[in-house]
Amino acid sequence: MKEVIVHPLPHLRGEIREVFIPIPADDEIVIKVVVAGSNVKDWSHITALNIAVNSGDDIAGTVYSMGASVQKTAEFRVGDRVAAFHRMLTPGGAYAEYAIAPAQTTFIIPQNVSFEEAATLPLVTLTAGISLFRRQSLPPPWNPRPPSSGPLPLIVYGASSALGTFAIKLARLSNIHPIIAICGASHEVVDPLLDFSRGDRIVDYRKGIDTMKASVKDALGGLSARHALDAISSKGTWVPLAQMLHESANSGPFQVSVVSGANRYDDADIPSSVEILYTYVGTGHYGEYKPTMPKQPADKAIVKYDVEFAFVFYRYLSRLLAQGDIYGHPFEVIPGGLAGVEEGLNKLKNGEARGVKYVYRVS
């Protein structure tokens, strides 16, 4: 079979090579890839580590083979349409004709969802889910807040990104409002996601930090905001978020979720009342952080249950998709199949993906 090895340096390029079809471990599924999706981490992580691998993790395709333990559950059958989140930086990635993923991060694609749409879902939805419902302990969509509940503000920075939009979609299903969505030119992606009758608002970050903070305060209308997600987590974006939370109430605790492991998040301007929480989506596979990762939960034991959360989350996501209660991110198909991976990742690296996810039709 063919797969793409992504070389990050001295410039980002893709090398197509011939390899054997993966053999699944007991808890794994081999998937014949129809569409692969891409994420910023597909180039940024390997650049930081200076390693060359098949870095794709979003898979949409059909079940080709299963490990012994997966076969016993009878949950999947050969030929099933599935989407999956591959274990990051391990063999068998999405940029290939056949890829491999654990059963707990694989789910059925409903018939009303295309492979392209499905390929936009796995990594970012679980990142949003772990950030909101595991790290910040907000109520998940299968146990939402009662309709009579009072306001529970959530600030989302980078709201038009794939991660930001899925965080908003999931928050709404949990009856979390008002949602203060901070974004820029791609706000038209965010507009349909918000319920303005519940106090949801859009704030434009391009007018400067001070104006942004004042606009958020105005949008909150005197409410105390204790929860925020930084879907960008670059160049100190978490600092004004932390300050907004601190300034919205007399006392903490406040929580800001961040998603990049490349930062320490120990800036002097972060108020002491604000807890920065790093989401490593790989805990959905391993149930633990790597020792060197920043801002891990104080209770390490609870992280092991992220594996169980991932299992439940993806099956519920499949149900939401079938019911039409959630849908994928806008996408752009990069032509050329596997040969287009190099182009797509360079476009991602250059910041050209505005309100869309790049996907590649492999077969």
Image: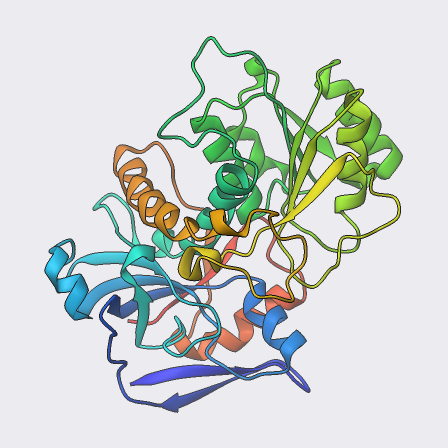
Q: Nearer the viewer, residue 250 or 49?
A: 250
In the rendered image, residue 261, in percent from the top left (x then y), is placed at: 65, 61
- In the image, what residue occupies the spot 25% across and 74% down? 25
Residue 182 x/y as whole percent = 69, 36
Up the image or down, 169 lies above or below 153; here it is below
Q: Quadrant of residue 238?
A: top right
Question: Which x, y percent locates residue 266?
Answer: 80, 52
Q: How many marks?
A: 0
Please indicate whether residue 63 sits to the left or right of residue 126 in the image: left
Position of residue 248 measured from the top left corner of the image (x, y, whole percent): 78, 23
Q: How is the image coloured?
A: rainbow
Which quadrant, please, contains the C terminus? Answer: bottom left
As displayed, is residue 203 above or below residue 275?
above
Name the residue: 63% across, 69% down.
Answer: 44
- Looking at the image, residue 58 sits to the left or right of residue 224; the answer is left
* Image position of 121 (left or right of 46): left
Q: Quadrant of the N terminus?
A: bottom left
User: In the rendered image, is residue 66 in sight?
Assistant: no
Vertical arrangement, residue 187 with respect to residue 352, above or below: above
Tell whether 45 sits left or right of 288: right
Q: Residue at x 77, y 21 (%)?
A: 249
32 and 228: which is toward the camera: 228
Q: Name the one closer to the observer, 354 or 168.
A: 168
Seen from this angle, which residue lies furthest bottom? 18
Q: Is residue 287 visible?
A: yes
Q: Residue at x 32, y 66 (%)?
A: 101
